[in-house]
Amino acid sequence: MSSLINHADIRIGTLAGMGNGANYLKQILPYGFESFQLTIWQTIGDLKLEEIAPSVLDTIGDKAIISSLGMFGNPLQDENAAKGWEICIRNAKRFNCNMVCGFAGALEDRPVPESMPKFKEVYGHLVKIAEEEGVRIAFENCDMGGTWERPKWNIAHSPRAWEMMFNEVPSDVLGLEWEPCHQMVSLVDPLPQLRKWIDKIYHVHGKDATINWDVIKEQGLRSGVQAIYHRTPGFGDTNWTDVITILRQGGFTGSIDIEGWHDPIYRGDLEMTGQVYGLNYLKQCRGGAYIPNPV
């Protein structure tokens, strides 16, 4: 278990595009981010992880860690996305990390249960590699605008699907990259869910939501009037002190990495303003500055 000293058990960080390399990290590191998830959209493409890793590690030094690599494509339909997962798993140790996160994928023209044979095929293979490499796999809980009948990009958006997935490929390597926002979009109360699934939560995205209940009560969810907004932590409805309490009670160690670029207000020129506010808010929810006990 990571030490509680100086809050080393739960670090607060943010997401950064792998393609932006070390230059982006160099600019935002002074704000106090403690970890970074390096993200890749859809496929690896021309990225050479073995060349990116040394400059990233040299830039962050002992000020932060790479919590995970993020592979956000559809590996159940796109062979290049599946290959990207394998490349990330095999290269995670170059970044001194042991986790790869992302979308589970989906067969988008059929209900979620019909994706399970393909899920077993793809992740049965990836789990073997992950076990060999000492890497864990964590699925983000975003629905990407899909439904149970017609999922998009990702089947790992509800507990019912998680149970199916973990039954298809039973391994301690597989877990969840969880955040309250995506559950709130489905009108799920995130805290009871967090308590129930804590043993399978390997990484946390720092993203919240605001639910406008007056709109829902008057218009519902299918009126075209937006009722739920993704928010940077500190601006939404979730009490992150409760989230961190449940994580610590459940023995979670790892990172909460802020997923920015979604807040309707703190975006554009205010993007980093919002992220740094969220960073400091989450540090306060974690307990504030570490104070050693008297000897």
Image (cartoon, rainbow, N blue to C red):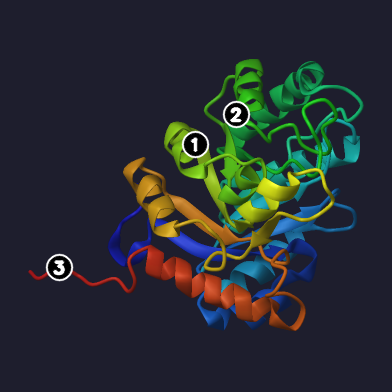
Give the camera-side residue of 4 and 180: 180
Q: Which residue is mark 1?
A: 193
Q: Amino acid at mark 3?
A: Asn
Q: Earlier in the sequence, mark 3 or mark 1?
A: 1
Q: Measuring 54% from the left and 76% from the top, which residue is drawn there? A: 277
**Farthest residue toward the front?**
218
- The answer to whether residue 62 of the structure is visible from this angle is no
Q: Is mark 1 in CB contact (under 8 Å) with mark 2?
A: yes
Q: Indicate left or right for 175 with 251 as reference.
A: right
Question: Quick check: 144 above or below 82?
Answer: below
Residue 55's image quarter? bottom right
Question: Which structural element holds mark 2?
Answer: helix
Q: Amino acid at mark 2?
A: Pro
- Dot 2, crowdedness within 10 Å: few (<14), some or many (≥20)? few
Q: Earlier in the sequence, mark 1 or mark 2?
A: 2
Q: Measuring 65% from the left and 74% from the top, which residue is drawn there? A: 25
Residue 106's image quarter? top right
**Which percent across, then down, holds residue 199?**
44, 34
Q: Is mark 3 in CB contact (under 8 Å) with mark 1?
A: no
- Dot 3, crowdedness within 10 Å: few (<14), some or many (≥20)? few
Question: Which structural element holds mark 3?
Answer: loop
Q: Which residue is mark 3?
A: 293
How much space separates mark 2 and mark 3, taking CA atoms? Answer: 40 Å
How much space separates mark 1 and mark 2, taking CA atoms? Answer: 9 Å
**Which percent across, then down, holds residue 59?**
61, 75
- The answer to whether residue 64 of the structure is visible from this angle is yes
Q: Which residue is mark 2?
A: 159
How much space separates mark 3 and mark 1, taking CA atoms? Answer: 33 Å
Question: Which structural element holds mark 1?
Answer: helix
Question: Quick check: 99 above or below 17?
Answer: above
Q: Earlier in the sequence, mark 2 or mark 3?
A: 2
In this view, the mark in front (2 or 3)? 2
